[in-house]
Image: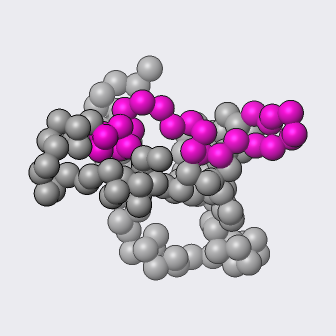
Amino acid sequence: MPTVEELKQTAFNAEKDLNSYQAKQGLGKKSDSTLESGVDEMVEKKFEQPAGLKYGPGSTASGSDHRVIPEDEGGTRDDRDRLPTAGQFNGTGGPEDDIKTESSNRGGDQEVPNLQDLKRRGVAQ
């Protein structure tokens, strides 16, 4: 288990590497796959622990409830062999619940969305 000081030093070195002129400008020799895809896979070698690299659709986090959750991220297929969407994982305590609680506690306040605003945003039904 690394100590706090070792973790701080690792974070400092990583930030220093990311802020280097070479990293920002993309200088240095590049492999054919890096030139074709625009993604430098050699970045994985900079980490002591195994790292993974994804690119293309579904590789980034997004605020969309329609994003499909792949099996390697915990998505399980249903009876019709479909993967779940991010919207199916919404639980209590999310932004929708915060808006509903705030609107019920501060009724009549112009700054709090009313029922029509909630419906327009897709929060209320």
Q: Position of residue 48 (x, y in %)?
A: 55, 39
Q: Is residue 97 magenta?
A: yes
Q: Position of residue 96 (x, y in %)?
A: 38, 43
Which stretch is magenta? 76-100
Quarter of the image for the N terminus: give it: top left
Q: Main secondary structure of the magenta part?
A: loop
Residue 37 sits in quarter:
bottom right
Say if residue 32 shows up in the picture: yes
Q: Is residue 58 above or below residue 40?
A: above
Taking the spot 52% from the left edge, 78% from the top edge, the residue there is 27
Q: Is residue 34 above or below residue 50?
A: below
| Residue reaching furthest to the top | 1
Taking the spot 57% from the left edge, 44% from the top edge, the residue there is 87
Asked whether 51 or 89 is in front, the reply is 89
Q: Position of residue 105 (x, y in %)?
A: 17, 36
| Residue reaching furthest to the right | 80
Taking the spot 36% from the left edge, 44% from the top edge, the residue there is 95
Q: Is residue 58 above or below residue 95?
A: below
* Apparent side of residue 68 relative to residue 95 in the rendered image (left or right): right
Q: Is residue 50 magenta?
A: no
Taking the spot 81% from the left edge, 34% from the top edge, the residue there is 78
